[in-house]
Image (tube, grey):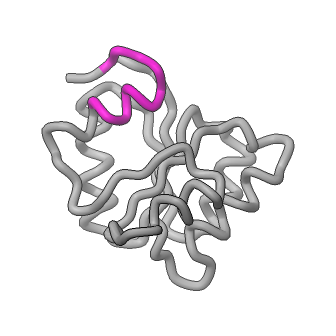
Amino acid sequence: MSSNKVLIVEDNPMNLELITDLLEISGYSILQATTAEEGINIAKTESPDLILMDIGLPEMDGLTATKILKNDEKTKKIPIIALTSHAMLGDEEMIRNAGCEGYITKPINTREFPKEIAQYLGSSSSI
């Protein structure tokens, strides 16, 4: 089991609950934020091992939040994975240019999701 701390920044309550449940079952410690601003503050105070960032957040979008985190000494080395329903041509380049190390499209594959997270963390921990 993993003891890695994962911050989920997601404004959709159903998505947040699903992702949280999948990762808690896999042994991850979960932090939650429903806005980009809240996610930035939690990332700075809690130093998670990984951030899952929804791109389509209200007010400040996830790519803007990612750029802020990647320009901050305290948070720039935390891997950020975009969670997005945008899988159009050019979106991956836009997501990577913002500073994300990767992206996972929604709806997520519940069987593969914990394995994908484990790969991003460089560990073999999964169900």
User: Can you say whether 11 is above or below 24 in the image?
Assistant: below
Question: Image quadrant of residue 108?
Answer: bottom left
Q: Is residue 116 magenta?
A: yes
The quarter of the displayed image where residue 111 is located: top left
Magenta-colored stretch includes residue 101: no
Q: Position of residue 91 (x, y in %)?
A: 45, 67
| Residue positioned 62% across, 78% down in the render | 60
Most extreme residue toward the left is 111
Identify which residue is drawn at 48% across, 39% down. 6
Q: Residue at x 74, y 47 (%)?
A: 44
Q: In which image quadrant can residue 113 be found?
A: top left
Magenta residues, dominant SS class: helix
Residue 22 spot, x, y in % from top left: 24, 41
Percent of width and height locating residue 119 = 39, 27
Determine the residue positioned at 53% across, 60% down: 93
In the image shown, does 75 or 24 lie closer to the viewer? 75
Residue 118 horizontal side relative to residue 53, left or right = left
Magenta span of residues: 115-125
| Residue 120, image x, y percentages | 45, 31
Q: Quadrant of the N terminus?
A: top left
Kindly give the residue lying farthest to the bottom in the view shown: 59
Q: Is residue 120 above or below residue 64?
A: above
Count how many numbered circles sit on residues in the image.
0
Relative side of 4 to 112, left or right: right
